Amino acid sequence: MSKLLNVFSSSFKMRLYFFKKLPSLFFWGVGVEKIDRTMAKISIKYGWKTQNPFGSIYFSALAGTAELSTGLLAMLAIEKEDVSMLVVGMQARFMKKAKGKIVFTCEDGIKISKAVQNAILTGEGQEVLAISKGYNEEGDIVAEFDILWSFKKRNRD
């Protein structure tokens, strides 16, 4: 099992990682529901730490959760590679108020891995659009984020 999968399959290790590396996710109480190399499901709950004045989850908390669902797949793809990763674009659509528990799902792990491999093979930067959809407890989509990732092989000359 990869080191990252090991971290995110343990609630304690995941919370410690968030505390050290991504404190806003720790504060918001973001959780990893499911992760493998092809897909990630990340959750966030409505509460005083995530609320906006309109009785739903603040858009920045939704964006951070959505980005994590794509970013973990990117981190897995570069885990043993000398490749940098960076968000270079984002677009969001909000369909419903985000109340209760929202789970963001990204199923673009294979597409992300192919972009990383192309960056390694060609030495050229590669971009890939990863889509994360957030669903409420009733199964309705509340938000959709398009996260544009850039991958580039590091030159260690």
Image (spheres, grey):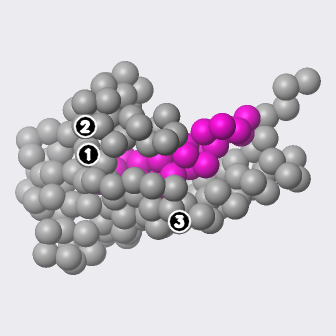
Q: Which residue is at 81% across, 47% downward?
A: 120
In this rendered view, identify the residue nearer to me: 34 or 95.
Answer: 34
Q: Amino acid at mark 2?
A: Ser
* Disc 2 + disc 1, Cβ < 8 Å: yes
Q: Residues within 10 Å of mark 2 (few under 14, many from 20)?
A: few
Residue 108, numbered circle: 3
Residue 141, numbered circle: none
> Disc 2 vs disc 1: which is toward the camera?
2
Q: Residues within 10 Å of mark 1 (few under 14, many from 20)?
A: many
Left or right: residue 58 versus residue 133 is: left
Q: Amino acid at mark 3?
A: Asp
Give the residues in magenta: 62-88
Residue that mark 1 sits on: 31
Residue 92 in the image: state x and y as whole percent.
Answer: 41, 64
Furthest residue toward front: 1
Residue 118 in the image: state x and y as whole percent.
Answer: 79, 57
Residue that mark 2 sits on: 11
Furthest residue toward right: 157
Residue 41 in the image: state x and y as whole percent.
Answer: 34, 58
Q: Indicate the quadrant where residue 134 lies.
A: bottom left
Q: Which residue is at 39% across, 53% downward?
A: 35
Q: Amino acid at mark 1?
A: Gly
Mark 2 element type: helix
Mark 1 element type: strand
Left or right: residue 2 versus residue 112 is: left
